[in-house]
Image (tube, rainbow, N blue to C red):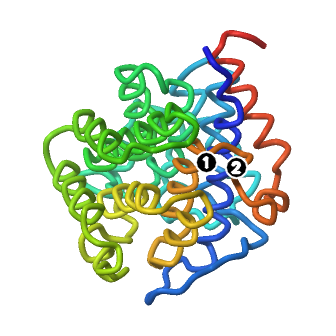
Amino acid sequence: MDDKSDRFIGSLIGTAVGDSLGAQREGTSGFQEVREIGSRYTDDTVMTIGVAESLIEAKGFHYFHMAEQFIRNYELEPWRRYGSAPPRVFRMMKSGRLGFGMLDRDIFPEGSYGNGAAMRVSPVGLLYHDDPATLREIACQTAAITHSHELAIEGAALQACAVALAVQTESGKVRVNEFLGTLRMFTKPGPYQEKLKAVIKLIETDPDKIEQADVVRELGNGVQAINSVPTAIYCFLANPDFESALIYAVSLGGDADTIGAMTGAIAGACYGIGQIPARWKVPVENREHIETLARKLWALKVGTR
């Protein structure tokens, strides 16, 4: 197995970079470029860190271990701009309701279809990048801790698959049609298939004729997984390098920190840490810890310590 450790590092640092960039545009409308990262990342990165920490410590997925890691990280830094629902789920867990998912249905009758499960799933895509069946299973299980709606779960699986495919690209050279074709074969029939068709349509259109408003109209930029995971995939595929993909993703506004984080996870997995601009990666909060987690995740993958 060739050494992909730089891509593991690139994906986790890329998540933090995209999150920090997008946090400055979160909830805004209109289209505006942001080129310098802010001083803080948000819950997107914290929860990604939690997934990585749990996978490493438990040597794979363990529902209760990961749930407890999420709670522990939240209680250490509750100010990281968490959405309203996850802390409520955490409180239910703390009260003794550590069942296998569905706790979000106390808040949303059909379960949460937000992108909170997809935004944190990149460590699963990295660890199981060469095993699609296990990747789907673990991505769905990690999602269900806080998100039980089918659209949230499938969005997490799709994002994990995109990260996995990015890790496996040859020297960062993306074959766009092959990438999208594999995603379509992986994804269940339904809304995400239709969104991927829209991604293909946009990719095949002359870039000079595509406005950012067209992308938002076709793919979305909201907090729902269905309106952000395909958008992140498009931002990655429609741009030639890490920097331009991240600037484009964040410029769309809306849930910019999460779309930025997911785009950063995919692009970082493709291009590796070496192609993330130094002005972005050097000042990332807790960079040494995040890089250490990426190396440990790679060591777990190859069976070493």
Whole-percent x, y for residue 26 in the image: 54, 77
Q: State the residue in front, 207 or 300.
A: 207
Give left or right: position of 284 versus 74. right
> Is 171 on the left-hand or right-hand side of 169?
right
> Whole-Å distance between the Cαs marked 2 and 1?
7 Å
> Where is mark 1, residue-wise?
268
- Give residue 247's quadrant in the image: bottom right
Q: Specify whether 279 is left or right of 155.
A: right
Point out residue 139 in the picture as x, y percentages from the top left corner.
Answer: 42, 33
Residue ID at (32%, 64%): 227
2 or 1: mark nearer the eye: 1
Earlier in the chain: of badge 2 and badge 1, it is: 2
Q: Compared with residue 92, is residue 293 higher up or lower down, i.e. above or below?
A: above
Please give the residue where the numbered disc 2 appears in the rendered image. 13
Residue depicted at x 14% and y 41%: 189
Please count the marks in the image.
Answer: 2
In depth, the one of 172 and 185 nearer the eye is 172
Q: Position of residue 231 (x, y in %)?
A: 37, 62
